Image: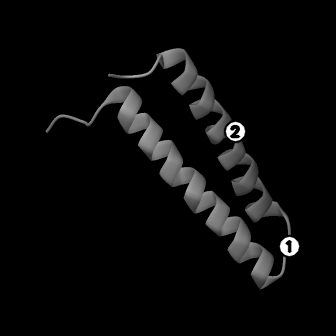
Amino acid sequence: MKSLPLFDTSRLAAIRADREALLRKLRTVRMDAHSRIRTERKLALLTAEQVRLERSLYGEPRR
């Protein structure tokens, strides 16, 4: 049973916005190696969550 699409899409939109902000920060802000690693890790976790939500919302692609 799938959850309501309205909930999933709002969470998905928030994750996309957070990812864009982190990508922008990585491109524009000079930071030390430890901060860069933490930021890249946050980005990787958000990306994984985005993929999980997209797969549950839109299903697996057909081959």
Under mark 1, the amino acid is: Arg
Under mark 2, the amino acid is: Ala
Q: Which mark is residue 30?
A: 1
Image side of residue 62 versus residue 38, left or right = left
In which quadrant of the rendered image does the C terminus lie?
Answer: top left
Sequence-wise, the earlier of marks 2 and 1 is 2
Task: Classify 7 as above or below 50.
Answer: above
Q: Which residue is mark 2?
A: 17
Residue in the foreground of this view, choosing between 40 and 29: 40
**Residue furthest left as drawn:** 63
Task: Classify 35 as above or below 58.
Answer: below
Image side of residue 47 versus residue 35, left or right = left
Q: Which mark is residue 43?
A: none
Image side of residue 24 versus residue 54, left or right = right
Does dot 1 land on a helix, a strand or a loop? Answer: loop
Q: CA distance from mark 2 to mark 1?
A: 21 Å
* Label 2 Cα neighbours within 10 Å, binned few <14 / some 14-19 / many ≥20: few
User: Residue 62: x, y in percent?
Assistant: 18, 34
Residue in the foreground of this view, choosing between 22 and 9: 9
Residue under the point 67% across and 34% down: 14
Residue under the point 61% across and 31% down: 11
